[in-house]
Amino acid sequence: MAAPMLLVLAAVGGWPLVRTIWFSLTDSELADLGNYAFIGLENYVGEYGLLASPEWWQAVGNTLLFSGLSVTLETLLGLGVALLLNQASRLRTLLRAALLVPWAIPTVVSAKMWSWMLHDQFGIVNHHLPALGVITVPLAWTADPQLSLFSIVLVDVWKATPYMALLILAALQMVPLECYEAARVDGVPRWQVFRRITLPLILPGLLVAMVFRTLDALRVFDLIYVMTSNSRDTQSMSVFVREQLIDFGLVGYGSAAATCLFFMIALLSIVAMSLLRKTFERAAA
């Protein structure tokens, strides 16, 4: 019964992956894909290989920093929003629908929208912040090396927090009401209720949401590319791959970078699934 689905997955995902790994072992170029030579691991560990490239390691660092900051902020904000939406209210359904708006906007559209809003001369952010006394002069949010990555993180938090909030809200609604009623009868303070009851019971769902969001953040491309293009200060691993493959035409070298990115995410997925399985087993016990 599953064979047709597995065949489709192999054709859609397996063949491109195998072809990418093969190209990473060659010196192929975009101008002539049919003319290449097998060079083994030269694209990885050679004198000019990927692991000796400071640009690649900077892209790795940018990606890890972006992922760590964005997922942490999105988890904290998403947890707060989910706790608010979990309270009984007549507007709860309307608020849940409104919460989906940032997540429903395509990433390219939201990235371009925020690029205009953060423009150093014409952006609405630089128009209002000096008027409120927050800053004294307009800032180049996406051009300043010290602000650009932070600005992208904030835009990603604005867009992805609703996703985290809805996943955490689903976990909150699975918590038995009897637990809260018993705590209320015993006079347990709200903070202790959250720490001793709510957080342990929603922890498996919270971890799943964090894993999904982390895997998505590690392969970020469109948000960074639209807002800052190929800037070294914000370049992610996916943007680095695109630059090597398309701008420089180095299919072999770019495929090596793409392969490293794939195995990094695959390894993280395996580790995360193992940890989640142990967490679920402890929760069930």
Image: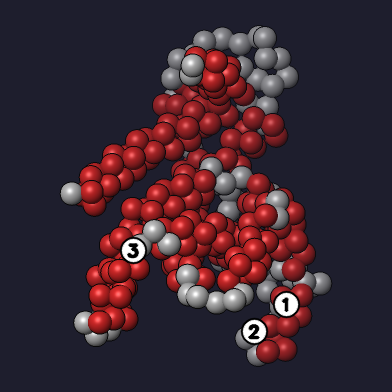
Residue behind mark 1:
126
* Occupied quadrant, residue 269: top left
Dot 1 or dot 2: first in sequence order is 1
Which is nearer the eye, 214 or 181? 181
> CB of mark 3 within 8 Å of CB of mark 2?
no
| Crowd around label 2: few <14 · some 14–19 · many ≥20 (10 Å) | few
Residue found farthest to the left: 285
Q: Residue at the spot x=65%, y=69% of the render?
A: 94
* Occupied quadrant, residue 11: top right
SS state under label 1: helix
Measured as percent of width and height from the top left, residue 81 is found at 50, 70
Whether residue 48 appears in this view of the structure is: no
Residue behind mark 3:
176
Q: Is residue 9 left or right of residue 138?
A: left
Amino acid identity at mark 2: Ile
* Residues at marks 1 and 3, CA–CA distance in whole angstroms: 47 Å
Q: Which mark is residue 78?
A: none
Task: Say if 62 sits above or below 162 in the image.
Answer: above
Amino acid identity at mark 3: Pro
SS state under label 3: loop
* Occupied quadrant, residue 202: bottom left
> CB of mark 1 within 8 Å of CB of mark 2?
yes
Q: Residue at the spot x=28%, y=42% of the render?
A: 277
SS state under label 2: loop
Q: Residue at the spot x=71%, y=63% of the render?
A: 114
* Residues at marks 3 and 2, CA–CA distance in whole angstroms: 47 Å
